[in-house]
Image (cartoon, coloured by chain):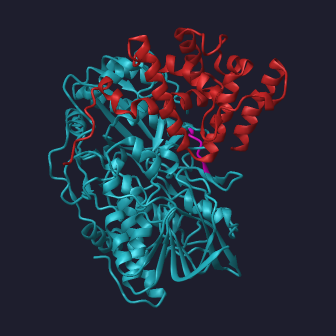
Chain colours: A red, B cyan
Amino acid sequence: MQRRQWLALGAVSAAVLAAGGGALAFLRPGLEGERLSSAGREVFRGVGKAMLAGNWPVQPDLVRAAMEDWLNRVDVLVAGLPVHAQAELSQLLALLASGAGRVMLAGLLEPWETAPAAAIQQALQSMRVSSWSLRQQAYQALHDISGGAYFSAAQTWSLLGYPGPRALR
Amino acid sequence: MRRRRSFATSIVGSGAGGGITAELLARAGLHVVIVEEGPLRSSADFDQRESTAYPFLYQESAARKTEDKAINILQGRCVGGSTTVNWTSSFRTPSSTLRYWRDRFGLADFTDDALAPFFMQAEKRLNIAPWLTAPNENNDLLRRGAAVLGVPAAAIARNVKGCWNLGSCGMGCPTNAKQSMLITTIPAALDRGATLLVETRAQRLEFANGNVRALVCGPVRPNGADASGPTTTIVARHYVLAGGAINTPALLLRSNVPDPHGRLGTRTFLHPVVMSAGVMAQKVEGWQGAPQSIYTDHFLETQAIDGPIGFKLEAPPLHPVIFSSSVVGFGEQQAELLRSFPSTHVLLALLRDGFHAQAPGGVVKLRSDGSPVLDYPLTGFVMDGARRAMLTMAEIQFAAGARQVLPVHELARPYDSWAQAREAIDSLPMKPLLTKVVSAHVMGGCGMAADSAQGVTRPDGGHWQLANVSIHDGSLFPTSIGANPQLSIYGIVNRLAQGLAKRLGAADVILA
């Protein structure tokens, strides 16, 4: 990880320690074995609810299945990232998964699992236009991974009106 | 246990520069090894899906970024390099660029006339010709909108043969129509006895007394991480570095080669790109049809090359992942825009960096694990060009009949008229991370110059401090090109490699 990025995230980590108490080791990593950890999934479920609102199926039981499919595609996307990007993402998700980090970095008071989509959207918007570049960078990473994993699957293409590649045979 | 192999010439990289060099040197009778970091994938593997292409064919899953994460870089990483995944646009190096190189970098024999035969050979070898099929709607909108404003536009030449007009070039050509290095120079070199090592990264050069003694290489995993397994040490008379900008400077940095004037990795350019999305009344379907078939250089030619930054306009192909990433915003508002995909027209502006003190490009650095990162600060000078480009693109899109135009900026929203868009764009804070900036052209970092104080590489491609090293890729350019760079690499490396073959005492060869 770039030293400046470590220092930046380190400053947040230090603040998280001060706010939440305890060692950095107690932060649950966001990735485990190049896939989302349970903490990482918790964050992404919340992010996905808000970031991709308007694209999920309407029926609640279909939403759950679609979300699990999407999280599995996020795993595939993450596995293809280079080591330095995986390390950064893991620490970012670890911070976002922690209470203090979620408040400080995302501006979200409620836990990811229970916060209503509107509250998460407010948090994402504040990251998107923040004067603190680390929050903007975090927003862009969440935006691109969410959308990239979502729309890479053929079953989502009808939302875009995209017919898929032309068959060659 | 290390493996050790000897060759006449070792070439790092199988992209535009590596491919041309490999074919010429192999045909000249030299025993060549090509070391490629990426995998060998070919048309049987190209399924026209971004989820396949991005992780397998691109650097860092098509998400390589500058240090501040403000620019997303598309660069190839596979046999054929960026030529396997590019959009086929072929332009000779503009005269104004060459003139600047002669004037500022002492590159006296970089004239249109001197380079013409080498460009012609490359055009013949790679079937580069003006694209005569009618442009798709995404491209024709650029032509029509520009025409309304009195701005001339023209057809782009492409390196294709028997093109099916699919539009999937960026995911690897599934019909072998695109004349990339993958299906032209690399097979030609292999036919003449060259050896190709894939999924093998050149880790470092070992040198003494101004000469490289060996190249140490190691296996890599699909995501580019170092794999466990023995290293391979290659010993050669001559080493050609063609890993591309960012990668070639990184190899030299990892090797701690002499850099007495601190030039290595500096002046790395990106043609930073900004975009504008227009929603039309009619179907555009920007995913199909030859991508990038129309361009205009009007906003490069109507001002001094060292004045306010100029830009070239083109229309990129659009596919789901790249489209959803380019449409800024999220949630229901973004979803509504995404539904307009079939009628969305996107323009891009390539900013011509490197010709002004306030557009000095970026610097390649190494992370602690040896991987490269480009530190490219987006200056106010460059971002002023971004604003002017966004204004121009919006004006062209409304002239072409757009109902709405969304400048690709986090604080923009779709505007319903040119007057509204102009007022809004004039007051957008043109800052990094708010303005979406991407790059598909990485250039410089081992710039050529007639004087060792001004560059890393001599005008003949030889490294200034290492006698048996040449650099034959886009990192050679002292400035950005001001045009899509593949043909500049083909033509210039063609000349350099023919000269190298002579210096190595091999047979005379020409490319075509």
Residue drawn at the location 32% of the way across and 29% of the way down: A157
* Count of numbered tags: 0
On the image, the x and y values in percent for residue A150 come to: 43, 29
Is residue B212 or residue B416 the one in the foreground? B212
Q: Quadrant of residue B317?
A: top left
Residue drawn at the location 36% of the way across and 52% of the way down: B86
Q: Is residue B203 left or right of residue B298?
A: right
Residue drawn at the location 56% of the way across and 18% of the way down: A46
Verify whether residue B251 appears in magenta. no
Compared to residue B59, the image places residue A99 above or below, namely above
Verify whether residue B375 appears in magenta. yes
Report whether residue B483 is seen: no
Compared to residue B299, the image places residue B448 above or below, namely below
On the image, the x and y values in percent for residue A116 come to: 55, 8
Is residue B211 or residue A138 the one in the foreground? A138
Q: Quadrant of residue B414?
A: top left
Q: Is residue B375 left or right of residue B409?
A: right
Report whether residue B240 is seen: yes
On the image, the x and y values in percent for residue B175 come to: 24, 55
Q: Which residues are magenta?
A: B373-379
Q: Quadrant of the N terminus of chain B?
A: bottom right
Q: Quadrant of the C terminus of chain B?
A: bottom left
Compared to residue A148, the image places residue B339 above or below, namely above
Is residue B454 or residue B131 the one in the foreground? B131
